Image: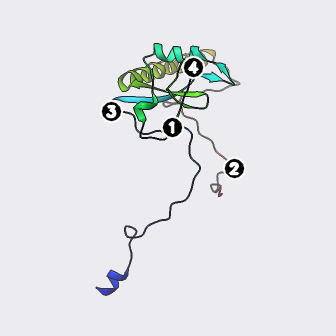
Amino acid sequence: MVAREARSTRDQETRKKTWTPPNKLDLPEPPVGMKYRWVRHELRGESEAGNVYERRRQGYEVVNASEIADYHIDKMEDGSYAGAVRSGDLILMKVPEEIAEQRNDYFEEQANRMQQSVDHEMQRSGNEKMPWKQEADHSSKVKVGSGSAPTKFED
């Protein structure tokens, strides 16, 4: 019994934290039912107001720094987005999760339609020089080397 008590477990051990550079796009969790997204408001000092306007038309709203006051952030001091949370040329916007999911579904459907169109064209062309086999999941596979043993890459 004494030997068992002397052993330490991973639960009892504490690992030293290692320093990592901060991520400029880190944020706290958004409020329940909302999603955050960084949106470009300028590029190299030139206004990209159309980009922000487009997001607003999709249901996004600018996040004001007072909404996440407990978190260390940078905010716009002046201009059309004064008070907004920013990181360089980006401002933080929020959207209800429901709208974000609908937007994702829309673009996924667009991508599926494009893939179906490509599949149809490939089947229709029947070019013998370019054999084509439709994969159910449209994934690609890469085989490297002779296949005898996998190559191991280490840092």
Q: Nearer the viewer, mark 2 or mark 3?
A: 3
What residue does disc 2 label? 145
Kind of residue at badge 3: Val
Element on which disc 3 rests = loop
In the displayed structure, would residue 90 be above or below residue 153?
A: above
Please indicate whether residue 77 sits to the left or right of residue 102 in the image: right
Residue 32, which numbered label? Answer: 3
Q: Amino acid at mark 1?
A: Ile
Q: Which callout, 4 or 1, points to the residue nearer the camera?
A: 4
- In this picture, is 121 found above or below 151? above
Q: x, y percentage for residue 77?
A: 55, 27
Per the image, label 1 sits on a secondary structure element best described as loop
Q: Residue furthest left?
A: 1
Closer to the camera in the image, 1 or 40: 40
Give the left or right position of residue 98, taking residue 41 as reference. left
> Residue 79 has which mark?
4
Work out whether mark 2 precedes mark 3 in sequence or the reverse, and give the earlier one.
3
Q: Give the quadrant of the C terminus.
A: bottom right
Residue extending farthest bottom: 2
Q: CA distance from mark 1 to mark 2?
A: 48 Å
For residue 76, above or below residue 122:
below
Which residue corresponds to the image point at 52% horizontal and 14% vertical from the top-left? 53
Disc 3 packing (10 Å; few <14; some 14–19; many ≥20) = few
Q: Secondary structure at mark 4?
A: loop
Q: Is 32 situated left or right of 133 in this image? A: left
Could you tell me how far apart the alpha carbons at marks 2 and 3 are, in whole angstroms? Answer: 49 Å
Residue depth check, mark 3 versus mark 4: number of the one nearer the observer: 4
Residue at the right extreme, as displayed = 129
Closer to the camera in the image, 42 or 109: 42
Which one is earlier in the sequence, the residue at label 1 or at label 2? 1
Q: Earlier in the sequence, mark 2 or mark 4?
A: 4
Residue, disc 1: 73
